[in-house]
Amino acid sequence: MMRRRIVAEYVVPALTLVAALALWEAATYAFKIPRFIMPAPSAILGEGWEWRYRFIHHTWVTLYETLGGFALSIAVGVPLAVLIVYSPALRSALYPLIVLTQSVPKIAIAPVLLLVVGHGEFPKVIVAFLVAFFPVVVDTATGLAATPPELLDLSRSYRASAFKTFLKVRLPMALPFVFAGAKVAITLSVIGAVVGEFVGSDAGLGYVILSATSYWKTELAFSSMILLSVMAILLFGAVSLVERFTCPWLAPAGEE
Amino acid sequence: MIRLDHVDKTYRTRRGDPVHALDDITLDVGENEFVTLVGPSGCGKSTLLKLVAGLTPATGGAISIRGQAVREPFPDVGFVFQQPVLLPWRSVFDNVLFSVEMLGLDPRQYRKQAGDLLELTGLGGFETKYPRELSGGMQQRVAICRALLPDPSLLLMDEPFGALDAMTREEMSLELLRIWEERRKTILFVTHSIPEAILLADRVVVMTPRPGRIARVLPVELPRPRTMDLEFDPRFKTASDEVRRLIFAPRMATR
């Protein structure tokens, strides 16, 4: 039975992927598709390998911007959610503003931001942050509000301070929600960093995609995209892993 | 121990409409007495518990515990709700310690009592489990241990067995009686179940809704320790018929 599960969960998708790549490869040769329109997987791999040392630098830059934006979105988003939940006045003051920042397309802000903040990695960090912090705020606020009222009554009947109740009850209760927001935020941060690079940069995977396509080097753009998605998947996995360690009680029964 | 003197409670809903929850409640509860409050939904039973615990102020009348007026949360109290509301990230053992932690006491000094309580409620060996690994009945036992750990003189129970299946429910009622025989305290117990109210109580407070009023306070003259067999005792039947009549008669009359 175990064997059948492994086949279904890993072997089948892997075979499908290989078959799709083979079909793609064959099609580019059979129909003589120009490489700048649709390069063969082998050409993409070859070009990527050629660029391996330069890619280290560009990947690092994008990773740095992504992580910077993500860290900021958590560092700002969680306290903001706390303020919103605890103070009705701040809630009515801040919530419309937060929603407003979300209604402006980030791609539209990016050029202005770069104009204001200047060049380098920092403005990309800001764009990544602006894209990513919204789900963190919303999910954390939802989590903090989800504490059963009975638990709050219980804490109050024991005359525990609001801070103690926050630390021992509400914050841990909200933790799974914070992680749900963080998982969305990390993938959005990657998008934000790339958008920032598109607008104006001289390094990073987004920069590579942009400059490669302007020189008709499509295979280079493709290898850059693959690196980006691998990075996004690994980052998502890392956040999930941290969640597993911080919230072990969430693991389904029998999986510990 | 508890004295409610012409207590009145009106609160406002979110839309601002006033709701008259309790009307002219006068009740004396003695030291170590087991009193059950029974009545249909909306008769203010839960509100009454909150008033006694000092979680919400009365709009009229006076409440005192041991002669002291209740003006703020009264900490010498244990609360058990319909849902166990345990902390999912804490083990069973640490959930029991939660009450003393919130009271600002040193949890290390309560480890032995916590173990004893879990043993007493049949949860020995489950200390390191997470709440979600337990059945509903077991989770509720943990919640009872949590309430009992600081050894409060007053236990407020708001339909504690209401979410359990009928069999577990009977088992838990008897268990609660056993615990109460061993560690006497004053208990105010809210329930929808007439047999449960009679089985447990020294006195049954029958309430009617809208606004919540006390229809009658009924002493239960059944010997202790009590068992399930009491349901066949003619006095049990007389008492439950009486409670049923008090609850349903006013409704019939208005039809």
Image (cartoon, rainbow, N blue to C red):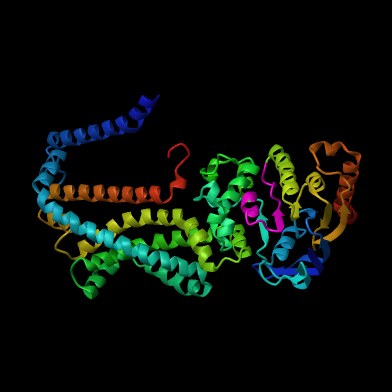
Q: Quadrant of residue A60?
A: bottom left
Count of numbered marks: 0
Q: Quadrant of residue A96?
A: bottom left
x and y, in percent, of residue A176 in the image: 45, 53
Please name the residue shown 34% across and 61% down the image: A132
x and y, in percent, of residue A224 in the image: 18, 50
Residue placed most toward the observer, B149 or B9: B149
Please name the residue shown 69% across and 46% down the image: B161
Q: Is residue A107 visible?
A: no
Residue placed most toward the observer, B141 or A102: B141
Instruction: Decide whether residue B163 is among the magenta residues.
Output: yes
Q: Vertically, is B252 above or below B6? A: above
In the rendered structure, the answer to whether residue B137 lies left or right of residue A35 reads: right
Q: Vertically, is A105 above or below A9? A: below
x and y, in percent, of residue A83 in the image: 46, 70
Q: Which residues are magenta?
A: B144-164
Please name the residue shown 35% across and 48% down the image: A241
Instruction: Decide whether residue A167 is among the magenta residues.
Output: no
Q: Is residue A194 visible?
A: yes
In the rendered structure, the answer to whether residue A66 lies left or right of residue B49 reads: left
x and y, in percent, of residue B63 in the image: 77, 69
In the picture, the quarter occupied by the C terminus of chain B is bottom right
In the rendered structure, the answer to whether residue A85 lies left or right of residue B245 reads: left
In the picture, the quarter occupied by the N terminus of chain B is bottom right
Please name the residue shown 74% across and 52% down the image: B184
